[in-house]
Image (spheres, coloured by chain):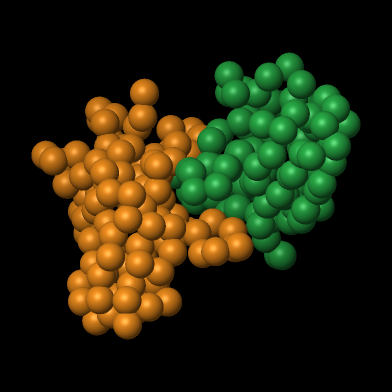
Amino acid sequence: AQSVAQPEDQVNVAEGNPLTVKCTYSVSGNPYLFWYVQYPNRGLQFLLKYITGDNLVKGSYGFEAEFNKSQTSFHLKKPSALVSDSALYFCVEDTDKLIFGTGTRLQVFP
Amino acid sequence: DTGVSQNPRHKITKRGQNVTFRCDPISEHNRLYWYRQTLGQGPEFLTYFQNEAQLEKSRLLSDRFSAERPKGSFSTLEIQRTEQGDSAMYLCASSLSQGYGYTFGSGTRLTVV
């Protein structure tokens, strides 16, 4: 069974606008959740993680994510999108190995 | 520390041939993982090691696939009698422990013709 779900295959946003990439998880208890980004022809890069503590997690390149236990969500956000943010984003659960979501392609238009 | 290194970067092979890929993890990381990624999809877990012990294998890993990590350092992934369906990007990652964070290599792209 899928541990994390990314309901959007693609998200389009204009440069300068806020962006949200959605993720929901299904594991009970306290999940370890990550966001990774994959640029074309490049490896997977770590953005941020939630293990415990503050529900708002800040990561690389101005990204942040909010862990919401009641909604079992871990949405990725950025206040102002850049064209260079265009990439494939994966929500990931760490169950002693990483289980990847299906990915959401973010397209930021100038 | 140069990160996780994978070799070769690309491999083209004929169907039925055997191929072997190598992964050199970050030196202090005792966990090493192999994943497979096809175009536009998320990486799928194949197997992982803690030191030299192979702790888990995915059902995706048929008996044509074998992985080793002698001495708990580098790892090799071998595919015997390759099939066209094996064409994918094979990714290696290493980590200190669960929740710590995983560093991925650039991958080996396999094309079976």
Q: Residue A19, located in which quarter of the rendered image?
A: bottom left
Q: A75 and A110: which one is in front? A: A110
Relative horizontal placement of residue A26, taking residue A89 as reference (left or right) = left
Residue B90 in view in this figure: yes
When the figure is inspected, residue B81 is found, relative to residue A20, above or below; the finding is above
Q: The C terminus of chain A lies in which quarter of the figure?
A: bottom left
Residue B94 position, x and y percent, is: 62, 47
Q: Residue at x 17, y 47 (%)?
A: A68
In this picture, residue B75 sits left or right of residue A77: right
Depicted B33 relative to depicted A10: above or below: above
Pick the front one: B32 or A4: A4
Could you tell me how many numbered marks the image carries?
0
As drawn, the residue found furthest toward the left would be A70
Farthest residue in the front direction? Answer: B113
Q: Position of residue B91 (x, y in %)?
A: 64, 46
Task: Name which residue lies at 61% across and 31% down.
Answer: B46
Residue B54 in the image, given as x and y percentages of width and height: 68, 25
Please state, as top left, top right, bottom left or bottom right, where the N terminus of chain A lies in the image: top left
> Residue at image x 36%, y 29%?
A2
| Residue A48 visible in image | no
Q: As drawn, is A6 to the left or to the right of B18?
A: left
> How far across and how far down the image is residue B36, in percent?
61, 39
In the rendered image, the vertical position of residue B54 relative to residue A20, given as above or below: above
Q: Color used for chain A?
A: orange
What colour is chain B? Answer: green
Tell me if residue A96 comes above or below residue A85 in the rendering: above
Residue drawn at x 77%, y 39% is B112
* Residue nearest the viewer, comparing A63 with B85: B85
